[in-house]
Image (cartoon, rainbow, N blue to C red):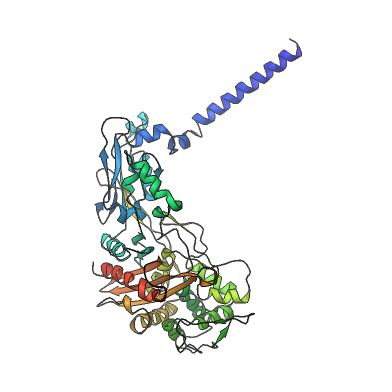
Protein backbone atom coordinates (compact mmCIF):
# COMPACT_ATOMS: atom_id res chain seq x y z
CA UNK A 1 0.00 0.00 0.00
CA UNK A 2 1.52 3.30 -1.01
CA UNK A 3 1.84 6.22 1.39
CA UNK A 4 -1.10 8.43 0.13
CA UNK A 5 -3.56 5.52 0.33
CA UNK A 6 -2.30 4.59 3.81
CA UNK A 7 -2.72 8.16 5.04
CA UNK A 8 -6.21 8.35 3.60
CA UNK A 9 -7.12 5.05 5.29
CA UNK A 10 -5.80 6.27 8.65
CA UNK A 11 -7.75 9.53 8.31
CA UNK A 12 -10.97 7.68 7.45
CA UNK A 13 -10.45 5.33 10.38
CA UNK A 14 -9.93 8.29 12.70
CA UNK A 15 -13.11 9.95 11.42
CA UNK A 16 -15.04 6.72 11.89
CA UNK A 17 -13.82 6.39 15.47
CA UNK A 18 -14.73 10.04 16.14
CA UNK A 19 -18.21 9.41 14.77
CA UNK A 20 -18.64 6.33 16.98
CA UNK A 21 -17.48 8.23 20.06
CA UNK A 22 -19.84 11.11 19.34
CA UNK A 23 -22.79 8.78 18.71
CA UNK A 24 -22.06 6.94 21.95
CA UNK A 25 -21.87 10.23 23.85
CA UNK A 26 -25.15 11.52 22.38
CA UNK A 27 -26.97 8.28 23.21
CA UNK A 28 -25.39 7.99 26.64
CA UNK A 29 -24.29 10.88 28.88
CA UNK A 30 -25.91 13.59 26.74
CA UNK A 31 -29.18 11.77 26.11
CA UNK A 32 -31.03 13.15 29.13
CA UNK A 33 -29.99 16.74 28.47
CA UNK A 34 -31.12 16.48 24.85
CA UNK A 35 -34.38 14.87 25.85
CA UNK A 36 -35.11 17.67 28.32
CA UNK A 37 -34.04 20.49 26.01
CA UNK A 38 -36.92 22.90 25.50
CA UNK A 39 -36.12 23.12 21.76
CA UNK A 40 -36.46 19.35 21.31
CA UNK A 41 -39.54 18.93 19.15
CA UNK A 42 -40.26 15.48 20.56
CA UNK A 43 -40.19 16.83 24.10
CA UNK A 44 -42.59 19.60 23.11
CA UNK A 45 -44.98 17.16 21.42
CA UNK A 46 -44.87 14.82 24.40
CA UNK A 47 -45.47 17.63 26.88
CA UNK A 48 -48.57 18.99 25.18
CA UNK A 49 -50.00 15.62 24.17
CA UNK A 50 -51.89 15.43 27.46
CA UNK A 51 -53.21 17.92 30.03
CA UNK A 52 -50.50 19.32 32.27
CA UNK A 53 -50.64 19.12 36.05
CA UNK A 54 -51.64 22.27 37.91
CA UNK A 55 -50.08 24.91 40.12
CA UNK A 56 -52.15 25.68 43.23
CA UNK A 57 -52.65 28.72 45.44
CA UNK A 58 -54.76 28.51 48.57
CA UNK A 59 -55.77 24.95 47.73
CA UNK A 60 -57.25 25.87 44.34
CA UNK A 61 -55.65 25.44 40.90
CA UNK A 62 -54.63 28.64 39.15
CA UNK A 63 -53.68 26.83 35.94
CA UNK A 64 -55.42 24.37 33.63
CA UNK A 65 -55.26 22.79 30.19
CA UNK A 66 -57.65 23.01 27.25
CA UNK A 67 -57.92 20.73 24.23
CA UNK A 68 -56.89 22.39 21.01
CA UNK A 69 -58.46 19.76 18.78
CA UNK A 70 -56.74 17.07 16.75
CA UNK A 71 -53.07 17.29 15.92
CA UNK A 72 -49.72 16.84 17.60
CA UNK A 73 -50.11 19.63 20.15
CA UNK A 74 -53.38 18.38 21.55
CA UNK A 75 -53.48 20.61 24.64
CA UNK A 76 -52.41 24.11 25.60
CA UNK A 77 -51.98 25.80 28.97
CA UNK A 78 -54.74 27.94 30.46
CA UNK A 79 -54.63 30.29 33.44
CA UNK A 80 -57.19 31.38 36.02
CA UNK A 81 -56.64 35.05 36.86
CA UNK A 82 -53.50 34.85 34.75
CA UNK A 83 -52.33 38.42 35.34
CA UNK A 84 -52.79 38.06 39.09
CA UNK A 85 -50.59 34.97 39.39
CA UNK A 86 -48.14 35.50 36.51
CA UNK A 87 -45.25 36.49 38.86
CA UNK A 88 -45.74 33.10 40.54
CA UNK A 89 -46.57 30.66 37.73
CA UNK A 90 -44.66 32.18 34.82
CA UNK A 91 -45.83 30.83 31.46
CA UNK A 92 -45.81 27.50 29.60
CA UNK A 93 -46.02 28.12 25.87
CA UNK A 94 -46.05 25.78 22.88
CA UNK A 95 -43.97 28.38 21.04
CA UNK A 96 -41.82 30.19 23.60
CA UNK A 97 -40.92 27.66 26.28
CA UNK A 98 -41.60 28.21 29.97
CA UNK A 99 -40.54 30.34 32.94
CA UNK A 100 -40.68 30.47 36.75
CA UNK A 101 -42.57 27.56 38.39
CA UNK A 102 -43.80 26.29 35.02
CA UNK A 103 -40.16 25.77 34.05
CA UNK A 104 -38.70 24.66 37.37
CA UNK A 105 -41.35 21.98 37.87
CA UNK A 106 -41.83 21.06 34.23
CA UNK A 107 -41.08 17.38 34.80
CA UNK A 108 -43.65 17.22 37.62
CA UNK A 109 -46.33 19.00 35.61
CA UNK A 110 -45.88 16.86 32.48
CA UNK A 111 -45.46 13.57 34.37
CA UNK A 112 -41.88 12.85 33.28
CA UNK A 113 -40.57 13.04 36.87
CA UNK A 114 -39.53 9.50 37.86
CA UNK A 115 -41.35 9.91 41.18
CA UNK A 116 -44.62 10.02 39.24
CA UNK A 117 -43.91 7.08 36.92
CA UNK A 118 -44.80 3.45 37.46
CA UNK A 119 -42.23 0.73 36.63
CA UNK A 120 -44.10 0.14 33.36
CA UNK A 121 -43.89 3.85 32.52
CA UNK A 122 -40.15 3.78 33.12
CA UNK A 123 -39.65 0.69 30.94
CA UNK A 124 -41.81 2.12 28.17
CA UNK A 125 -40.08 5.52 28.48
CA UNK A 126 -43.42 7.29 28.73
CA UNK A 127 -44.61 9.94 31.20
CA UNK A 128 -46.82 9.04 34.11
CA UNK A 129 -49.92 10.96 35.18
CA UNK A 130 -48.96 14.60 35.78
CA UNK A 131 -48.37 15.88 39.31
CA UNK A 132 -49.23 19.19 40.96
CA UNK A 133 -47.28 21.99 42.63
CA UNK A 134 -48.65 23.47 45.87
CA UNK A 135 -47.54 27.04 46.55
CA UNK A 136 -47.61 29.01 49.79
CA UNK A 137 -49.42 31.94 48.14
CA UNK A 138 -52.45 33.29 50.05
CA UNK A 139 -54.96 34.36 47.36
CA UNK A 140 -56.48 37.05 49.60
CA UNK A 141 -53.10 38.72 50.18
CA UNK A 142 -52.15 38.35 46.51
CA UNK A 143 -55.42 39.96 45.39
CA UNK A 144 -55.11 42.78 47.92
CA UNK A 145 -51.64 43.70 46.69
CA UNK A 146 -52.57 43.42 43.02
CA UNK A 147 -55.65 45.61 43.44
CA UNK A 148 -53.76 48.19 45.50
CA UNK A 149 -50.97 48.47 42.90
CA UNK A 150 -53.40 48.88 40.00
CA UNK A 151 -52.40 51.77 37.78
CA UNK A 152 -48.80 52.05 39.00
CA UNK A 153 -45.51 50.35 38.13
CA UNK A 154 -44.10 48.43 41.06
CA UNK A 155 -43.84 45.21 43.03
CA UNK A 156 -44.77 43.84 46.43
CA UNK A 157 -43.96 40.79 48.56
CA UNK A 158 -45.59 39.40 51.71
CA UNK A 159 -43.95 36.80 53.96
CA UNK A 160 -44.84 34.76 57.02
CA UNK A 161 -42.02 35.90 59.36
CA UNK A 162 -41.88 32.71 61.43
CA UNK A 163 -41.74 30.20 58.56
CA UNK A 164 -40.53 32.21 55.56
CA UNK A 165 -43.58 31.18 53.51
CA UNK A 166 -44.21 33.60 50.63
CA UNK A 167 -47.80 34.78 50.94
CA UNK A 168 -47.82 37.13 47.95
CA UNK A 169 -45.66 38.03 44.94
CA UNK A 170 -47.17 40.96 43.08
CA UNK A 171 -45.90 42.72 39.96
CA UNK A 172 -47.66 45.63 38.29
CA UNK A 173 -48.44 45.94 35.47
CA UNK A 174 -48.80 42.26 34.77
CA UNK A 175 -49.82 40.11 31.80
CA UNK A 176 -51.96 37.06 31.09
CA UNK A 177 -49.70 34.05 30.33
CA UNK A 178 -52.61 32.41 28.51
CA UNK A 179 -52.21 34.88 25.64
CA UNK A 180 -48.91 33.26 24.64
CA UNK A 181 -49.74 29.63 25.49
CA UNK A 182 -50.47 28.77 21.88
CA UNK A 183 -53.05 29.22 19.17
CA UNK A 184 -53.40 31.79 16.41
CA UNK A 185 -52.98 34.92 18.54
CA UNK A 186 -49.89 33.80 20.45
CA UNK A 187 -47.31 35.25 18.05
CA UNK A 188 -48.90 38.69 17.97
CA UNK A 189 -49.29 38.67 21.77
CA UNK A 190 -45.63 37.69 22.21
CA UNK A 191 -44.51 40.53 19.94
CA UNK A 192 -46.60 42.98 21.94
CA UNK A 193 -45.37 41.73 25.34
CA UNK A 194 -41.75 41.62 24.17
CA UNK A 195 -41.72 45.30 23.20
CA UNK A 196 -39.62 47.63 25.33
CA UNK A 197 -37.26 44.76 26.23
CA UNK A 198 -40.10 42.66 27.62
CA UNK A 199 -40.98 45.06 30.44
CA UNK A 200 -44.58 43.87 30.37
CA UNK A 201 -43.40 40.45 31.56
CA UNK A 202 -40.86 41.72 34.10
CA UNK A 203 -41.12 40.28 37.61
CA UNK A 204 -40.83 43.43 39.71
CA UNK A 205 -41.24 41.55 42.99
CA UNK A 206 -38.12 39.41 42.51
CA UNK A 207 -35.97 40.59 39.66
CA UNK A 208 -35.68 44.36 39.68
CA UNK A 209 -33.18 45.49 42.34
CA UNK A 210 -33.14 49.28 42.78
CA UNK A 211 -32.02 51.79 45.40
CA UNK A 212 -34.04 51.14 48.60
CA UNK A 213 -33.51 54.65 49.92
CA UNK A 214 -34.49 55.31 53.52
CA UNK A 215 -36.03 51.85 54.00
CA UNK A 216 -32.42 50.62 54.20
CA UNK A 217 -31.92 52.70 57.35
CA UNK A 218 -33.20 49.66 59.28
CA UNK A 219 -29.99 47.84 58.34
CA UNK A 220 -27.90 50.83 59.41
CA UNK A 221 -29.78 51.03 62.71
CA UNK A 222 -29.34 47.30 63.30
CA UNK A 223 -25.61 47.57 62.64
CA UNK A 224 -25.27 50.46 65.12
CA UNK A 225 -27.16 48.64 67.87
CA UNK A 226 -25.41 45.30 67.35
CA UNK A 227 -22.01 46.99 67.34
CA UNK A 228 -22.77 48.88 70.54
CA UNK A 229 -22.24 52.25 68.87
CA UNK A 230 -25.49 53.18 70.63
CA UNK A 231 -26.97 51.24 73.51
CA UNK A 232 -30.61 51.75 72.56
CA UNK A 233 -32.88 53.45 70.05
CA UNK A 234 -33.41 56.21 72.62
CA UNK A 235 -29.75 57.13 73.04
CA UNK A 236 -28.89 60.52 71.50
CA UNK A 237 -26.52 60.20 68.56
CA UNK A 238 -23.63 62.50 67.81
CA UNK A 239 -25.04 63.64 64.48
CA UNK A 240 -24.28 67.16 63.28
CA UNK A 241 -26.73 69.28 61.36
CA UNK A 242 -26.07 70.36 58.72
CA UNK A 243 -24.22 67.19 57.83
CA UNK A 244 -21.42 67.66 55.31
CA UNK A 245 -20.60 64.51 53.39
CA UNK A 246 -17.09 63.45 54.45
CA UNK A 247 -14.33 64.64 52.14
CA UNK A 248 -16.64 67.12 50.39
CA UNK A 249 -18.28 70.49 50.90
CA UNK A 250 -21.70 69.07 50.05
CA UNK A 251 -24.39 69.20 52.74
CA UNK A 252 -26.74 66.20 52.89
CA UNK A 253 -30.34 67.47 53.18
CA UNK A 254 -33.04 65.83 55.25
CA UNK A 255 -36.46 65.00 53.85
CA UNK A 256 -38.04 67.31 56.44
CA UNK A 257 -35.77 70.34 56.91
CA UNK A 258 -37.54 71.36 60.12
CA UNK A 259 -37.37 67.90 61.72
CA UNK A 260 -35.46 67.56 65.04
CA UNK A 261 -32.56 65.64 63.49
CA UNK A 262 -29.53 67.18 65.25
CA UNK A 263 -28.13 64.48 67.58
CA UNK A 264 -31.47 62.69 67.20
CA UNK A 265 -32.01 59.25 68.70
CA UNK A 266 -32.46 56.31 66.34
CA UNK A 267 -36.17 56.28 67.20
CA UNK A 268 -36.54 59.94 66.22
CA UNK A 269 -34.27 59.50 63.21
CA UNK A 270 -36.42 56.64 61.90
CA UNK A 271 -39.61 58.56 62.62
CA UNK A 272 -38.45 61.65 60.70
CA UNK A 273 -36.12 59.72 58.36
CA UNK A 274 -33.10 61.85 59.30
CA UNK A 275 -30.45 61.39 56.62
CA UNK A 276 -27.75 63.09 58.70
CA UNK A 277 -28.05 60.48 61.47
CA UNK A 278 -27.80 57.36 59.33
CA UNK A 279 -25.14 58.75 56.99
CA UNK A 280 -23.07 59.60 60.06
CA UNK A 281 -23.67 56.15 61.58
CA UNK A 282 -22.56 54.37 58.40
CA UNK A 283 -19.41 56.48 58.25
CA UNK A 284 -18.62 55.85 61.94
CA UNK A 285 -19.18 52.09 61.65
CA UNK A 286 -17.14 51.73 58.46
CA UNK A 287 -17.70 49.62 55.39
CA UNK A 288 -16.75 46.19 56.86
CA UNK A 289 -19.37 46.40 59.62
CA UNK A 290 -22.05 47.76 57.31
CA UNK A 291 -21.29 45.06 54.76
CA UNK A 292 -21.35 42.31 57.38
CA UNK A 293 -24.79 43.38 58.64
CA UNK A 294 -26.24 43.71 55.13
CA UNK A 295 -25.01 40.22 54.27
CA UNK A 296 -26.64 38.75 57.36
CA UNK A 297 -29.98 39.90 55.97
CA UNK A 298 -29.30 38.42 52.51
CA UNK A 299 -27.55 41.16 50.54
CA UNK A 300 -24.87 40.03 48.06
CA UNK A 301 -26.32 36.48 48.02
CA UNK A 302 -25.88 35.32 44.40
CA UNK A 303 -28.25 32.34 44.64
CA UNK A 304 -31.38 33.50 46.42
CA UNK A 305 -33.77 30.78 45.26
CA UNK A 306 -37.31 30.44 46.61
CA UNK A 307 -37.08 28.19 44.37
CA UNK A 308 -37.49 30.83 41.62
CA UNK A 309 -34.24 32.77 41.57
CA UNK A 310 -34.45 36.36 42.77
CA UNK A 311 -32.02 39.02 41.62
CA UNK A 312 -29.13 39.73 43.97
CA UNK A 313 -29.62 42.67 46.31
CA UNK A 314 -26.32 44.51 46.64
CA UNK A 315 -24.33 46.30 49.30
CA UNK A 316 -21.09 47.49 47.63
CA UNK A 317 -18.00 45.40 48.34
CA UNK A 318 -15.35 47.47 46.55
CA UNK A 319 -13.51 50.21 48.40
CA UNK A 320 -15.38 53.49 48.24
CA UNK A 321 -14.91 57.12 49.17
CA UNK A 322 -15.98 58.24 52.63
CA UNK A 323 -18.81 60.28 51.13
CA UNK A 324 -20.12 57.23 49.26
CA UNK A 325 -19.94 55.11 52.42
CA UNK A 326 -22.07 57.70 54.21
CA UNK A 327 -24.64 57.55 51.40
CA UNK A 328 -24.94 53.78 51.71
CA UNK A 329 -26.27 54.36 55.22
CA UNK A 330 -29.40 55.91 53.69
CA UNK A 331 -29.76 53.27 50.95
CA UNK A 332 -28.21 55.29 48.16
CA UNK A 333 -24.93 55.19 46.17
CA UNK A 334 -24.62 51.59 44.85
CA UNK A 335 -27.02 49.91 47.31
CA UNK A 336 -29.83 48.02 45.55
CA UNK A 337 -32.60 45.75 46.81
CA UNK A 338 -35.66 43.83 45.65
CA UNK A 339 -39.03 43.88 47.42
CA UNK A 340 -38.29 40.30 48.52
CA UNK A 341 -35.10 41.43 50.27
CA UNK A 342 -36.80 44.38 51.97
CA UNK A 343 -39.63 42.13 53.19
CA UNK A 344 -37.00 39.79 54.66
CA UNK A 345 -35.66 42.66 56.80
CA UNK A 346 -39.03 43.36 58.42
CA UNK A 347 -39.69 39.62 58.77
CA UNK A 348 -36.48 39.11 60.74
CA UNK A 349 -37.19 42.10 62.99
CA UNK A 350 -40.69 40.79 63.73
CA UNK A 351 -39.39 37.25 64.30
CA UNK A 352 -37.08 38.18 67.17
CA UNK A 353 -34.06 38.66 64.95
CA UNK A 354 -34.38 35.25 63.28
CA UNK A 355 -34.46 35.29 59.47
CA UNK A 356 -36.33 32.34 57.96
CA UNK A 357 -35.32 31.67 54.36
CA UNK A 358 -38.27 32.47 52.05
CA UNK A 359 -39.92 29.60 50.19
CA UNK A 360 -42.73 29.54 47.62
CA UNK A 361 -43.49 25.82 47.14
CA UNK A 362 -44.66 23.67 50.03
CA UNK A 363 -45.47 20.33 48.44
CA UNK A 364 -45.49 18.22 45.28
CA UNK A 365 -48.41 15.83 44.87
CA UNK A 366 -49.26 13.07 42.43
CA UNK A 367 -52.31 12.90 40.16
CA UNK A 368 -54.44 11.60 43.03
CA UNK A 369 -53.44 14.35 45.42
CA UNK A 370 -51.10 12.19 47.48
CA UNK A 371 -47.93 13.89 48.65
CA UNK A 372 -44.82 12.95 46.69
CA UNK A 373 -42.46 15.47 48.24
CA UNK A 374 -42.89 17.85 51.14
CA UNK A 375 -40.49 20.58 50.17
CA UNK A 376 -38.12 21.25 53.09
CA UNK A 377 -38.02 24.78 54.40
CA UNK A 378 -34.82 26.74 54.18
CA UNK A 379 -32.59 27.50 57.11
CA UNK A 380 -33.35 29.99 59.88
CA UNK A 381 -30.49 32.12 61.16
CA UNK A 382 -30.21 34.56 64.05
CA UNK A 383 -29.15 37.71 62.19
CA UNK A 384 -29.55 40.16 65.08
CA UNK A 385 -30.06 39.67 68.81
CA UNK A 386 -33.59 39.47 70.24
CA UNK A 387 -32.89 42.71 72.13
CA UNK A 388 -31.92 44.57 68.96
CA UNK A 389 -35.04 43.20 67.22
CA UNK A 390 -37.18 44.40 70.13
CA UNK A 391 -35.58 47.85 69.97
CA UNK A 392 -36.18 48.10 66.22
CA UNK A 393 -39.79 46.96 66.55
CA UNK A 394 -40.42 49.68 69.09
CA UNK A 395 -38.91 52.33 66.80
CA UNK A 396 -40.73 51.02 63.71
CA UNK A 397 -44.04 51.16 65.56
CA UNK A 398 -43.31 54.79 66.38
CA UNK A 399 -42.92 55.42 62.62
CA UNK A 400 -46.45 54.09 62.05
CA UNK A 401 -48.10 55.45 65.19
CA UNK A 402 -46.57 58.94 65.13
CA UNK A 403 -44.57 59.35 61.93
CA UNK A 404 -44.61 59.07 58.15
CA UNK A 405 -45.98 55.50 58.13
CA UNK A 406 -49.43 56.37 59.44
CA UNK A 407 -51.10 55.17 56.23
CA UNK A 408 -49.97 51.60 57.05
CA UNK A 409 -52.10 51.31 60.18
CA UNK A 410 -54.33 48.24 60.34
CA UNK A 411 -57.26 48.32 62.80
CA UNK A 412 -56.66 46.02 65.77
CA UNK A 413 -53.10 45.17 64.73
CA UNK A 414 -49.65 46.17 65.94
CA UNK A 415 -47.81 47.54 62.91
CA UNK A 416 -44.24 48.72 62.55
CA UNK A 417 -42.71 50.05 59.36
CA UNK A 418 -40.21 52.23 57.59
CA UNK A 419 -40.79 54.50 54.63
CA UNK A 420 -38.31 55.11 51.86
CA UNK A 421 -38.04 57.67 49.08
CA UNK A 422 -35.03 56.79 46.92
CA UNK A 423 -33.49 59.39 44.65
CA UNK A 424 -32.63 58.38 41.09
CA UNK A 425 -31.30 59.82 37.88
CA UNK A 426 -28.36 62.15 37.33
CA UNK A 427 -28.75 65.03 39.74
CA UNK A 428 -32.01 63.48 41.03
CA UNK A 429 -33.54 64.27 37.63
CA UNK A 430 -36.09 61.42 37.64
CA UNK A 431 -39.04 60.84 39.91
CA UNK A 432 -37.93 59.03 43.08
CA UNK A 433 -38.86 55.47 44.03
CA UNK A 434 -41.39 55.04 46.83
CA UNK A 435 -40.75 52.22 49.36
CA UNK A 436 -42.39 50.85 52.45
CA UNK A 437 -41.39 47.81 54.48
CA UNK A 438 -43.37 46.71 57.50
CA UNK A 439 -44.63 43.93 59.72
CA UNK A 440 -48.02 43.40 61.31
CA UNK A 441 -49.18 41.27 64.23
CA UNK A 442 -52.74 40.45 65.28
CA UNK A 443 -54.34 37.58 67.20
CA UNK A 444 -51.36 35.25 66.87
CA UNK A 445 -50.91 35.96 63.15
CA UNK A 446 -47.85 37.69 61.68
CA UNK A 447 -46.98 39.12 58.29
CA UNK A 448 -44.10 41.10 56.81
CA UNK A 449 -44.42 43.10 53.61
CA UNK A 450 -42.41 45.31 51.31
CA UNK A 451 -43.82 47.53 48.59
CA UNK A 452 -41.87 49.33 45.89
CA UNK A 453 -43.43 51.81 43.47
CA UNK A 454 -41.32 52.78 40.49
CA UNK A 455 -43.76 55.03 38.69
CA UNK A 456 -47.21 56.45 39.29
CA UNK A 457 -49.44 59.27 38.17
CA UNK A 458 -48.71 61.24 41.34
CA UNK A 459 -46.99 64.60 41.10
CA UNK A 460 -43.31 64.54 42.02
CA UNK A 461 -43.98 66.46 45.24
CA UNK A 462 -46.46 63.75 46.28
CA UNK A 463 -44.13 60.80 45.73
CA UNK A 464 -43.02 59.25 49.00
CA UNK A 465 -43.09 55.86 50.64
CA UNK A 466 -45.59 57.04 53.23
CA UNK A 467 -48.06 58.42 50.69
CA UNK A 468 -47.85 55.79 47.93
CA UNK A 469 -46.41 52.52 49.24
CA UNK A 470 -47.69 52.43 52.83
CA UNK A 471 -51.40 52.16 51.85
CA UNK A 472 -50.59 49.18 49.63
CA UNK A 473 -48.78 47.52 52.52
CA UNK A 474 -51.76 48.19 54.81
CA UNK A 475 -54.17 46.42 52.46
CA UNK A 476 -51.89 43.41 52.15
CA UNK A 477 -51.32 43.17 55.91
CA UNK A 478 -55.04 43.50 56.62
CA UNK A 479 -55.76 40.62 54.21
CA UNK A 480 -53.13 38.45 55.88
CA UNK A 481 -54.12 39.26 59.46
CA UNK A 482 -57.86 38.84 58.89
CA UNK A 483 -57.49 35.25 57.67
Q: Is residue 7 visible to us here? A: yes
Q: List x then y, in percent, for residue 169.
A: 35, 60
Above or below: residue 87 compared with residue 405: above
Lateral position of residue 138 relative to residue 190, left or right: left
Extreme-right residue of the structure: 3
Q: Measuring 62% from the left and 71% from the top, which residue is drawn there?
A: 320
Q: Is residue 163 visible to us here? A: no
Considering depth in this image, is 480 or 357 the residue closer to the camera? 480
Q: Measuring 55% from the left and 78% from the top, which residue is drawn there?
A: 282
Quarter-wise, where is residue 281 in the image?
bottom right
Q: List x then y, in percent, for residue 371.
A: 29, 48
Image quarter in which the C terminus is found = bottom left
Considering depth in this image, is 129 or 426 the residue closer to the camera? 426
Considering depth in this image, is 260 or 173 the residue closer to the camera? 173
Number of marks in picture: 0
Q: List x then y, in percent, for residue 160.
A: 34, 66
Lateral position of residue 414 relative to residue 315, left or right: left
Above or below: residue 475 compared with residue 277: above
Q: List x then y, in percent, for residue 319.
A: 63, 69
Extreme-top residue of the structure: 1
Q: Measuring 54% from the left and 73% from the top, which residue is drawn there?
A: 328
Q: Measuring 26% from the left and 67% from the top, which residue is drawn there?
A: 479
Quarter-wise, where is residue 152 in the image?
bottom left
Image quarter in which the N terminus is found = top right
Amino acid sequence: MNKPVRRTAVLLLFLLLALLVRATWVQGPEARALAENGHNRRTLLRRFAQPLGDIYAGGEPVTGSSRTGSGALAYQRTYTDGALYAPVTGYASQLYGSTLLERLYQSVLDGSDVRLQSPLDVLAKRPGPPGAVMTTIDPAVQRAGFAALHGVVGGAVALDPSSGAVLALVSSPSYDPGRISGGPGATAAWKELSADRGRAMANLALREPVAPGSAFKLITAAAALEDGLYTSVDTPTHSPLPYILPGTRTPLPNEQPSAPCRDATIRTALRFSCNNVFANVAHDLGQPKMLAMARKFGFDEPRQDIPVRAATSVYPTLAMAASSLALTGIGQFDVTATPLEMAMISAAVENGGRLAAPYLVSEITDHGGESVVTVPRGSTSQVISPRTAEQLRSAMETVVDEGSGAAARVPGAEVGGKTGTAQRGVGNSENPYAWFTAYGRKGGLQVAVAVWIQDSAAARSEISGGRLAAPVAARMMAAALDR
